[in-house]
Amino acid sequence: MSALLEVKALEVAYGGIRALKGIDFEVNEGELVALIGANGAGKSTTLRALSSLVRPAAGTIRYRGEVTSALPSYALVRKGLALVPEGRGVFARLSVRENLEMGAYHRGDREIGKDLDRVFGLMPRLAERSTQLAGTLSGGEQQMLAIGRSLMSRPKLLLLDEPSMGLAPIMVQKVFEIVQTVAREGVTILLVEQNAKLALELSSRGYVMESGTISLSGPSAKLLADPKVREAYLGEAA
Amino acid sequence: MTFHPEIFLQQIINGLVLGSIYALVALGYTMVYGILGLINFAHGEVVMIGALTALSVILALHGAAPDLPAALFILAGTLVAIPVTMALGYTIERVAYRPLRNAPRLAPLITAIGVSIVLQNVALLVWGRSYRSWPPILPTTPHTILGANITDLQIFIVLAAAAIMAGLMLLVNKTKLGRAMRATAENPAVAGLMGVNVNVIISVTFVIGAALGAIAGVMVSANYQIAHYYMGFILGLKAFTAAVLGGIGNLAGAMLGGLLLGLIESLGAGYIGDLTGGFLGSHYQDVFAFFVLIVVLIFRPSGLVGERVAERA
Ligand SMILES: Nc1ncnc2c1ncn2[C@@H]1O[C@H](COP(=O)(O)OP(=O)(O)OP(=O)(O)O)[C@@H](O)[C@H]1O
Ligand SMILES: [Mg+2]
């Protein structure tokens, strides 16, 4: 089976700062893959490069066999690659419903209404607040909205950047349940998380990033048991 | 000094006419600011080019067939002026602003002033230095209401401006394009992630603003019966003032600011003589706009309806 996403020797620099120093990884169709690592390791930068929000300095990104680094981000959504950015990025001055409609911006088909109902079914809180401005939602609701909005694009590959950030445990639970539901429906997911335990429990495979490189990779269960991972990311003494 | 209600009413009418025009021009400033955080100081010149283009068409048509109805002259002039300014607005953004998208804020501001000067000089070459007068096509006998006069043209200006602004509000608030414009104004990177081609939205914004500018240009030159290569400068500054007064970046604010500024100017010019015992006359009309600008900048820089402050990341 060929990989849905294949990254080779990817490097990204911000001015003089080398945020990614040549990383390799892949995500296969139907997988839920976790990407974990400390603050500043380069996780968001990786996702930003995958979405063409930053240009790689070197290396290749192949999505469905096609090299994408020269494509603008608006073209990638149309190909089924969606990013839920760090900090959610909801449109605060648009209503909840309008935010969701923005997710379907590139679509012209007749099933947008159906997908809207599906998102509202998945996230009843959003349905209740559909006419409210997104800026008035709680942090957790905004995260739901950001995920719901990305689903409106009918993604094949969904990139999630720290969906649990700043959420109370109960809300984290809900968000992860939704991620799991989406994954079960057949959407391939690359999940970036600070919450390594949750991410590794949810995923089948994982990568560990450390200052711009990938230091460990393997099946999530194995990573969860790895003493180095337990010490560094699960807060346990060695 | 006695109060004459019919004179007061007359000032209100004049103010609404002027204000409608200011509002249309102010929308061009505020839409571009809302989406790029950029003050397009060349917008006044776009209005001027619109006015002069329309007048040239009207003069040519009048030379060929002087007995056509006034509405037809105006329609023909406007229909030519709109695509001309649209192309101009598009080109200005592509050539002068897009290359500076990520430059420090001062750079596009200086470029805007440069574009203004270029456009003034182009107009000077094409239309010459002297004032161009409208041909006598408009009916001059006014209607009288409660002792005040209002012409067909004035009625038309106010109603057309209101209809256009209502249409713009519908476009921005109720259509997919409008939604993409608002999303882009709020966060262009995320709008891109939604599949929005941000460059297209920015071009559309400039083009719509320029079309509104052409219409305003025809209105203002019809109202004063003249057009001139330098007319865009003061008009642009006043409309910019109106946009700041309403809260720059906010569409409803630009409309409100435009109408208010028109009324302030008209009433101010009408009563300044009385208020200063004849020391200052109505030719001080232009001073009011700048007085308003300074007062707003000091006491309420975010404008009347502006919730957003001028600085944006
Ligand atoms: N726009 C930028 N300009 C300069 N440096 C940047 C920029 N964005 C990120 N960096 C740097 O690149 C490195 C990687 O940042 P990145 O945001 O990818 O980390 P991260 O793994 O997502 O961290 P976190 O878990 O805190 O979100 C950091 O050292 C950061 O300071
Ligand atoms: Mg990050």
Image (cartoon, coloured by chain):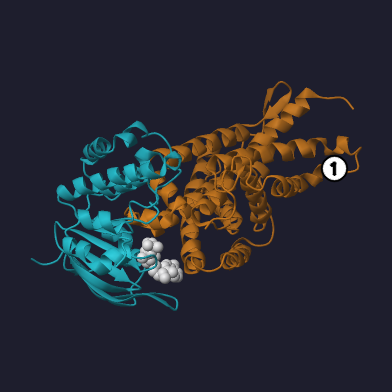
Chain colours: A cyan, B orange
x, y percentage for residue B261? 68, 41
The picture quadrant for ligand 1 comes to: bottom left
Residue that sits furthest to the top in the current view: B146
Is A63 placed left or right of B49 in the picture?
left
* Residue at the image point whose x is 23% and y is 71% from the top: A216
Is A27 placed left or right of A228 in the picture?
left
Q: Nearer the viewer, residue B198 or B239?
A: B198
Is residue B130 in sight in this rendering?
A: yes
Residue that sits furthest to the front in the current view: A237
* Residue at the image point whose x is 62% and y is 34% from the top: B154
x, y percentage for residue B1? 90, 27
Is B312 placed left or right of A222 in the picture?
right
Question: Count of labels shown?
Answer: 1
Residue A57: quadrant of the picture = bottom left
x, y percentage for residue A11? 32, 76
The image shows residue A180, relative to residue B151, as above or below, that is below
Q: Which residue is mark 1?
A: B281
The local crowd at label 1, few if under 14, some if 14 to 19, many if 20 or more residues have their Cα within 10 Å, is some
Is residue A50 in sight in this rendering?
A: no
Q: Nearer the viewer, residue A29 or B93?
A: A29
Query: The numbered mark 1 sits on a residue in which chain?
Result: B
Label 1 element class:
loop
The CB of the residue at mark 1 lies under 8 Å from ligand 1: no
x, y percentage for residue A68? 25, 68
* Residue at the image point whose x is 19% and y is 45% from the top: A181
Q: Amino acid at mark 1?
A: Gly
The image shows residue B134, relative to residue A30, as above or below, that is above
Q: Nearer the viewer, residue A127 or B66?
A: A127
Residue B256: quadrant of the picture = top right
